[in-house]
Image: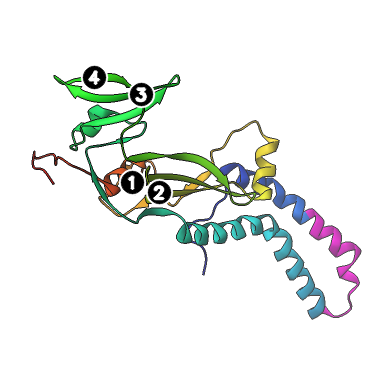
């Protein structure tokens, strides 16, 4: 069974088109120097077809292997994982209090320039107050790349309990770099590429819809919404 997605760039396909006549030239050379000397027609034709298939598909093998590995890795590690939920009136994290106050949170705490601040909404305006230390129990962070192999890396956002260190949930996204042939084609041309990503796929109606990808995806905000429940619900009722 073929993988659901074949990871090969447009530049890689261009390189493959350039490679085809080179592969055919090698095939013709091998036939003239070696294969035509085989007396048995059946053996000669079998050898010719086998070598032709090998030469024509060889540049794609790495991408096919990469695609299978990516599919397995994304299923095993990627996705939005919620282990536990918590009720709180705010959290520590780089977030916009105007946005999160709409969901019922009353404060956001974050630091910058070696100072710590608490952000609240007062009279429909953002109020920033310097504080000696964070008081929020829950922390939203992550975003660092963790190398898995030469082709794969993991980006992990998480929400954790600052007191116990327990992770309440995490969003794991896998980045995928091109196969060897694809990368060689990219290196020959002055073009840039962005790694493919997987693991952030969401069911229809969940997360955010990305028109150019024609799919729904999860983001860090979905992780927070899934793990932290505001003490005061948006309708004004206390949980």
Whether tag 3 and tag 1 are in contact, CB under 8 A, the answer is no
**Spatial CA span between label 4 and label 1:** 25 Å
Label 3, label 4: how many angstroms apart (C-alpha)?
A: 16 Å
- Name the residue carrying label 1: 223
Answer whether residue 64 is magenta in the image.
Answer: no
Residue 171: which numbered mark, if any? 2
Q: Position of residue 139 (x, y in %)?
A: 36, 39
Q: Is tag 3's residue or tag 4's residue first in the polypeptide sequence?
A: 4
Mark 1 surroundings within 10 Å by alpha-carbon count, few (fewer than 14), some (14 through 19), many (20 or more): many
Which tag, 2 or 3, sits closer to the chain's start?
3
Q: Is residue 196 left or right of residue 219?
A: right
Q: Are marks 4 and 2 in contact (CB under 8 Å)?
A: no
Residue span colored magenta: 25-41
Q: Nearer the viewer, mark 4 or mark 1?
A: 4
**Mark-to-mark CA distance, 2 and 3:** 30 Å
Categorize mark 4 by other alpha carbons within 10 Å: few (<14), some (14-19), many (20+): some
> Which numbered circle lies on residue 132?
3
Q: Are marks 1 and 2 in contact (CB under 8 Å)?
A: yes
Of marks 4 and 2, the one in the foreground: 4
Task: Determine whether 211 is above or below 75 in the image.
Answer: above
Foreground tag (3 vs 1): 3
Disc 4 is placed on an element classified as strand
Residue 91: quarter of image: top left
Helix, strand or loop at disc 2?
strand
The reply to whether the C-beta atoms of the residues labelled 2 and 3 are less than 8 Å apart is no
> First in sequence: mark 1 or mark 2?
2
């Amino acid at each position: 069974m073929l993988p659901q997605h074949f990871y090969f760039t447009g530049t890689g396909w261009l390189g493959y088109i350039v490679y085809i006549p080179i592969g055919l030239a090698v095939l013709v050379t091998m036939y003239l120097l070696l294969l035509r000397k085989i007396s048995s027609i059946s053996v000669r034709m079998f050898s010719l077809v086998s070598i032709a298939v090998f030469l024509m598909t060889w540049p794609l093998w790495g991408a096919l292997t990469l695609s299978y590995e990516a599919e397995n890795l994304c299923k095993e590690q990627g996705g939005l994982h919620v282990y536990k939920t918590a009720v709180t009136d705010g959290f520590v994290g780089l977030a916009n209090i105007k946005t999160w106050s709409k969901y019922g949170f009353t404060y956001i705490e974050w630091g910058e320039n070696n100072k710590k601040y608490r952000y609240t909404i007062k009279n429909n305006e953002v109020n920033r107050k310097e504080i000696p230390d964070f008081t929020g129990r829950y922390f939203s962070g992550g975003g660092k790349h963790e190398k898995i192999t030469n082709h794969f890396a993991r980006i992990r956002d998480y929400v954790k309990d600052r007191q116990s260190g327990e992770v309440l949930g995490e969003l794991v996204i896998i980045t995928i770099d091109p196969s060897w042939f694809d990368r060689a084609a990219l290196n020959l041309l002055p073009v840039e590429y962005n790694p493919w990503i997987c693991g952030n796929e969401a069911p229809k109606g969940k997360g955010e819809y990305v028109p150019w990808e024609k799919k729904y995806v999860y983001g860090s905000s979905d992780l927070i919404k899934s793990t932290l429940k505001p003490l005061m619900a948006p309708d004004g009722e206390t949980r």
